[in-house]
Amino acid sequence: MDFAETLLSWYDTHKRDLPWRETKDAYRIWISEIILQQTRVEQGWDYYLRFIDRFPDAKNLAQADEDEVLRLWQGLGYYSRARNLHTAAKTVAKQGSFPTTYEEVRALKGVGDYTAAAICSIAYNMPVAVLDGNVFRVLARYFHVELPINSTKGRKYFAKLAQELLPEAQAGTYNQAIMDFGALQCVPARPNCEQCPLRDSCSAFHQGDVSHFPVKERRLTVKDRYMAYVFLHQNGKTLMHQRIGSDIWRGLYEPLLIEFEQKPTDSEILTHSVLQSIDTSLVLHERVGILKHKLTHRTLYIRAFDAEVSQHANIPSGYQWVDAREMSQLPLPRAIELLLEKSMP
Ligand code: SF4
């Protein structure tokens, strides 16, 4: 038996008896798929039955008051799903019947690629493969696919693979079979490999690295940082210090830095206690506007100021006065170089 035949045979014995599996009515399948988007089967079950009981077709749902739709949804969370269902039901009611092409189904509010494929294959046996977390996991393990499932290349690869494996005559049943297989047998943690009908030909099982799949790309979260640099001058020299610690630009030099949690106002910068502790009579001149500087996982919003300090200023420890020649020899972050390229006072 090939991959698809094995899954269909497994499904025949193990399939879950779910209320929405008793119908081929696209409207009911749509309702069930929207409920299941962010809800576990066990929790969604009763909601589905209540929803279908009150709104047996799109016309009934379209005519309902939004408050009533939301009340029936209460407890399921993600209320945009209920609002989208209501809006889409009005579209369906206006058209007279539930859409029958993939494109029309996909165009309904709240319906994405996965949901459209599920509705069309289950209701109409249309040959479109579904791709959800379960399908990604089963395919990644069985075929030992190293491509990250959350990368563009990975998604394209899996979509093509899933489509090639789909037995066209049994598209709907097969789609449900592979999703159930992922939900019951090839589960994320501790899959039941010992009693798996695909075990003999499963690549990850044979290579002993089942838990490695599916591969996911770690996405870097880009954080915003708000920085104000103050170039303090005295007798033609500028106050600089070397960055230490595990932060960005370790070992490089910079002028006095004040950091803020959020975008600071002018007054928050000009009256900052660090400046006050150095010299209460400082007058700041802004050097450039906001400099936006992108690093791999940080976006820096930098403002830069110049100020002359008096002989009596309270210079913080760790700083040194450097003249223009010394400055040109210091290792500097690119952002500071850019600021220095702006006119010096
Ligand atoms: S052998 Fe294990 S990893 Fe491979 S398909 Fe079966 S349950 Fe999944």
Image (tube, helix red, strand yellow):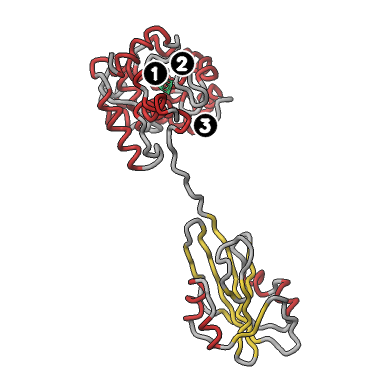
Tell me the CA gap for discs 3 and 2: 41 Å
What's the residue at 32%, 17% (across, down)? 174
Q: Is residue 9 in view? A: yes
Mark in the foreground, 1 or 3: 1
Which residue is tagged 2?
194
- Say which residue label 3 marks: 79
Label 1 within 8 A of ligand 1 by Cβ? yes
The reply to whether callout 2 and callout 1 are in contact (CB within 8 Å) is yes
Identity, as a three-letter code, of the amino acid under mark 2: Glu
**Quarter where residue 118 is shown:** top left
Give the label on residue 199, or none.
1
Q: Quarter holding the C terminus?
A: bottom right
**Towards the viewer: 66 or 181:** 181
Q: Is residue 175 left or right of residue 313?
A: left
Judging from the image, what secondary structure is the residue with disc 2 in? loop
Q: Are marks 3 and 2 in contact (CB under 8 Å)?
A: no
Q: Is residue 90 visible from the viewing direction of this image?
A: no
Q: Position of residue 308 (x, y in %)?
A: 65, 87
At a point 70% along the width and 71% down the height, the residue shown is 272
**Above or below, 108 relative to 221:** above
